[in-house]
Image: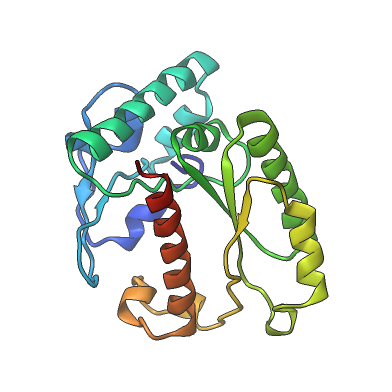
Amino acid sequence: MDFQAPSLHSLFETALPEYWLNDYLNGDCEPNEMIRNCNPKMLGGQLFVGFANPSTKAILKMSARNTRWEVKALQRLFKLRKTLLTKQGFEYLILDTSPGLQYSSINSVMAADIALIVTTPEESDIAGTQQMVHFLHRRIGKRIMILFNKVPSDWVQSEEMARLKDSLASEKTIFCDDIGCFCELPVSKDPCFFACEKEYHPFSKCLGKIVSRLVLLNAVDDP
């Protein structure tokens, strides 16, 4: 759902699809024509992905969409959710959005059970996250899970981190375990699913705890 700077396709060793998520939201194809089985070297299960079109033409076209189109796109997104989760037996649907309050990110939140916001301790990020939390909580009433990324080791459990979390707290806010700074992550030679290939790395363990938290929340809500 990041139509402004789509890059997710670059992580997968697969041919470019005939239909993109853009096409589905535009009503030009059905879910099965758009999603691809992109299962990497994982520990089990299957992973299907729908990619945003990375072409310059598609990016400019999505940027020019009007409100009427976005409303129809939201309806299509709800249809996608129902098709995958109810009719086709998918367990989870993850919508990866662009930063900030773009139409695509708002539509994603509307279709989601939980809004997971990733931020850093930097003041500029905190200011933007405060606006996002206020919007999601006051205007939409969604539950919010906040994940702090790139946290310096001496900040973990510090008073400064406690202050930042207080500034973002609301009755619907849940805080994940913080992820520290791992300099080796962005310098990997080849694109890979780090947590799958190096499952015992501290970063991978952090992700494991986040997944467990999300699964538990989903189990509590599932009737």
> What is the quadrant of residue 131 in the picture?
top right
Q: Position of residue 142 (x, y in %)?
A: 57, 38
Q: Is residue 46 above or below residue 51?
A: below
- Give the quadrant of residue 67: top right
Report x, y in % for residue 91: 27, 49
Front-most of 178 and 127? 178
Residue drawn 22% across the image and 44% down it: 17
Image point 48% across, 22% down: which residue?
A: 70
Q: Residue at x 77, y 68 (%)?
A: 162
* Residue at x-position 47% and y-position 43%: 2
Q: Quadrant of residue 103?
A: top right
Residue 19 makes an appearance in the image: no
In the figure, 179 relative to 122: above or below? below
Asked if residue 183 lies left or right of residue 51, the reply is right
Nearer to the camera, 39 or 207: 207
- 12 and 80: which is toward the camera: 80
Quarter in which the C terminus is drawn:
top left
Left or right: 27, with 188 as reference point:
left
Q: Is residue 190 left or right of residue 181?
A: left
Query: Is residue 201 or residue 187 the one in the foreground?
Result: 201
The answer to whether any part of residue 90 appears in the image is yes
Residue 210: percent from left, percent from top: 48, 65
